[in-house]
Amino acid sequence: MTKAPLQEVKDKFGSKEKLVDEILAKVKKSAEISKDEFKQKLLRQSNSKLLALHGREEQVHSQFGTREGLVDSIMKSRLGKKKQEDAGFRSRLDKLSTGELLGLSKGKRTATKETK
């Protein structure tokens, strides 16, 4: 039987605030928002969303080290024999969410689609 998200947060992290602090240490925030505003925004999210975000960030850090490492890995696999850097492709990748980048790394989505 699976635990409720609230119980999972309490068991693994002790409190929602501690989970948010761990996420803040791993997630790259936008320059347009302060750290305190970002923390408050995260605290308003559901426990299940926070657990999913934490799990995704853990996966990125364990497999690729950083988000940039993930982008580098995608670039390397997509460019194949072309050894030159494709700045346009990299800029499109940088606009994608971490979840979308993980999907790309697993071959579940193509990055040729224009992002908004």
Image (spheres, rainbow, N blue to C red):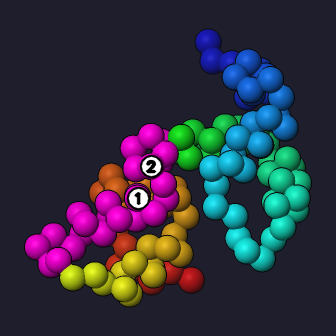
Q: Is residue 33 left or right of residue 12?
A: right
Residue at the disc numbered 1: 69
Percent across and percent down for residue 36 are 88, 58
Q: How many marks?
A: 2
Above or below residue 30? Residue 63 is above
Q: Is residue 4 visible in the rendered structure shown here?
A: no
- Magenta segment, which residues? 59-83
Q: Quadrant of the C terminus?
A: bottom right
Say which residue appears at 84% left-offset and 67% top-offset: 34
Going by the numbered disc 2, the residue's amino acid type is Gly
Work out which residue is located at the far bottom of the displayed protein and give it.
88
Q: Is residue 78 magenta?
A: yes
Label pair 2/1, CB-CB below 8 angstroms: yes
In the visual, does 87 lie left or right of 34? left
- Disc 2: which residue: 65
Please tell me in which quadrant of the rendered image residue 72 appears.
bottom left
State the SS at label 2. loop
Q: Nearer the viewer, residue 104 or 77?
A: 77
On the image, the x and y values in percent for residue 97 come to: 55, 64
Q: Is residue 79 left or right of residue 75?
A: left
Asked which quadrant contains residue 15, the reply is top right
Q: Main secondary structure of the magenta part?
A: helix
Quarter of the image with the N terminus is top right
Q: Amino acid at mark 1?
A: Gly
